[in-house]
Image (cartoon, rainbow, N blue to C red):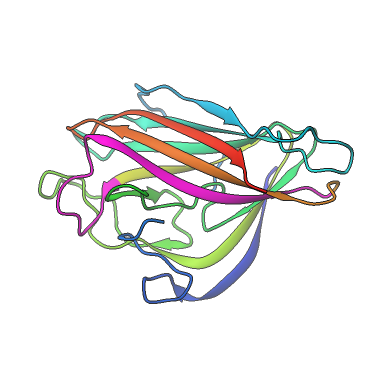
Amino acid sequence: MRRRRLLGSFAGLCTALTAGCLEITGPDSAETAPSETATTTGPTTTESATDATATEGSPDTDALTAAATVLQSSAVDSPPRVGVGVTNTADGEVRLSGGATVPFSSYWAEDGPLVALPDDREYVRGPSIPNEKTDGCWRADSNVRREDIGLTDVVPAGESVSTRFTLLTAVDADGCAVGDEFTFENQLSVDAEHWSTGYGVDVELTVARSEAGDVSSASATLRTTE
C-alpha cells in the first residue's frame, strides 16, 4: 500500500504576490492509476527515463514510466478530463517527492490559457467544475491556488500513482483554449533507501484539443534531469 508523507507546509495559499507561489495565469491527488469509466478516443503513450544502467547502491534511472489517458474526450456536456500516472518498474519501492498532487502538480499549461484542475483538492483551492459554458468555453470561475507544500508518495514495485484532471480555460483568457496542443511540465525527485543518492525527473503532459474543445489525445513523457 502506498504511504503519503507530508514534506512541508507554509501558511496561506499560493498567489502571484507570494514568493515561490504561482497562480492560474502564469505558466508554470495522488490516487491510484486512473480507474473511472471513460471513453478514450486518443492513444495512451508510455515513455521511460533511460540514463545509466543502475548498479547495486546506485540510483536506478530506469525505475519509472509515465503514461497519460483521456478519461473523457467530449466537451459537449461537461469539461473533458485526462489522467497522468507514474509507474514504479524497479525491483523495490521508490519515493516520489513533488508538489500538492504527486506525481503531477502542474496546473497551468506552458503554452496557452489551459488549466488542469486536479480531483484531489486537499491542498489546491480555486474554481469549481462549471455546469455550463461561459463565452463558449468550459471556463474556470477563479484562479487556481495551491498551498506551498511538498508531498512524498512511497510507491511499491510494480505499482502506480496518478493524478486526474478536469481541463478548463483560464478565468481571464481572451478566447477558448482549444484547437491546439497544450503542454504541462512537472518535476519530481526520486529516491530509495537502498540507493546511494536520488535523482530528478521531468514529467511532461501534452493534450491535443480540437476546435470544439474535445481532447483527441493525451501523452506523457519522462526524462531524467540529474
- Left or right, residue 112 beside residue 11: left
Position of residue 172 measured from the top left corner of the image (x, y, whole percent): 20, 59
> Where's residue 189, x and y in %?
65, 52
Quadrant location, the N terminus: top right
Q: Magenta stretch: residue 184 in it?
A: yes
Q: Is residue 88 left or right of residue 53?
A: left
Query: Is residue 198 in view?
Result: yes
Say left or right for 27 vs 174: right
Q: Nearer the viewer, residue 163 or 18?
A: 18
Q: Quadrant of residue 151?
A: bottom right
Measuring 22% from the left and 34% from the top, which residue is drawn there?
A: 179
35 to 98, vertically: above or below: above
Instruction: Identify the residue at image location x=23%, y=30%.
Output: 210
First to last magenta residue range: 168-193
User: Between residues 78 and 138, which one lies in front from this camera angle?
Assistant: 138
The residue most toward the right is: 56
